[in-house]
Image (spheres, helix red, strand yellow):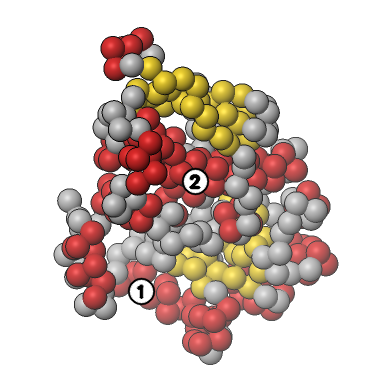
Amino acid sequence: MLLICDFIAMSSKGRAKKSASFSRKDHDNLLIDLSYYEDTPQGDITSQAIFKNAPVAKAIFWAKEPLVVSGWRFVNLLLARHFKKLTLSIDYQDGSVLTKRTKIGTVSGPITDILRAERLMLNALQHLSGIATQTQIFIKKISNQKVSLLDTRKTLPAWRFFEKEAVRHGGGQNHRFSLSDHYMIKDNHSDGAGSLEKAILLVKEDKVCNKRKSSLIITEVRTDKEFKTALKSSVDIILLDNMSKSEIKKCVRIYKQEKMPHKPLLEISGGVTLATISQSAKLGIHRISVGALTHSARAVDISLKIEKTLSKEKVAKI
């Protein structure tokens, strides 16, 4: 297992060695540990002062507004790693659509542990449920169209696994997870290489040389001229980046006229909002990527309220 000290040591050298293993489990444990030690480095001095004997308590998670649930995986990992005396009971799993004043779940155990874990649990649930809820709102706008809604890499550092899960809980799909997954030629790549055509050629050479058969080639285009270049280059996905409605329509016309055995998917990216996504979905494209699913989602209102405090003899009855 990769520990915090290992990660810091790797980072201090400027880069991790290629042999270093950094799994999903390592990532999750690191985030959980950082969150925990950030919030309670020396314990909860207030709760320790008030509850000398740490009585057993039961607390309820409440949805205080309509929402889509996400974040239980974070909560489960947090409790398993740092609050082993707490027991979590989930009434509505991730992806559940809830109305206001719905009981989401219950946590029971020593009241001092509940209060120490409270903010960490709520931060995760409110933030991730906010992303899931935002995603579902966007999904509803295009539900009558055969168009996929995708997220982007515009996520909080270290939270990408959880935020992309939240997008799926809301009904969306995930774009590439990291820079290592697929080739994506953006405007700075094209400008730096001298042209889009040259950038595509260099990427294709690299794909063959490094045997990255499963890696897709995705390219952004800004004009119909670049669109024609990408189309003839047989890339996998073409992103119509920040184009106007008329420019997108022009590219779609070119796309339909082109006779090819395997056409790339067309994706709209940049500047898509709740007010515009319905119209964008009707333009003849296949995918729409929206950064706002993660970078602009509002945290939803979820509370955790102590219902009762019990003696240790009654803990089995909770």
Q: Secondary structure at mark 2?
A: helix
Near-viewer residue (118 or 80): 118
The amino acid type, in three-letter code, at marker 1 is: Asp
Residue 111, can we see it? yes
Which residue matches tag 2?
A: 123
The amino acid type, in three-letter code, at marker 2 is: Asn
Q: Is residue 303 above or below residue 6?
A: above
Q: Residue at x 33, y 11 (%)?
A: 314
Q: Position of residue 318 (x, y in %)?
A: 38, 14
Q: Secondary structure at mark 1?
A: helix
Task: Please give left or right for residue 239 compared with residue 1 in the image.
Answer: right
Q: Position of residue 27 (x, y in %)?
A: 31, 53
Which residue matches tag 1?
A: 206
> Mark 2 or mark 1, which is nearer the start of the sequence?
2
Task: Please give left or right for residue 277 compared with residue 68 in the image.
Answer: right
Residue 317 placement: quadrant? top left
Residue 74, can we see it? no
Task: Please give left or right for residue 116 compared with residue 272 in the image.
Answer: left
Residue 117 placement: quadrant? top left
Near-viewer residue (233 or 37): 37
Q: Residue at x 21, y 70 (%)?
A: 10
| Dot 1 crowding, Cα within 10 Å, few <14, some 14–19, many 20+ | few
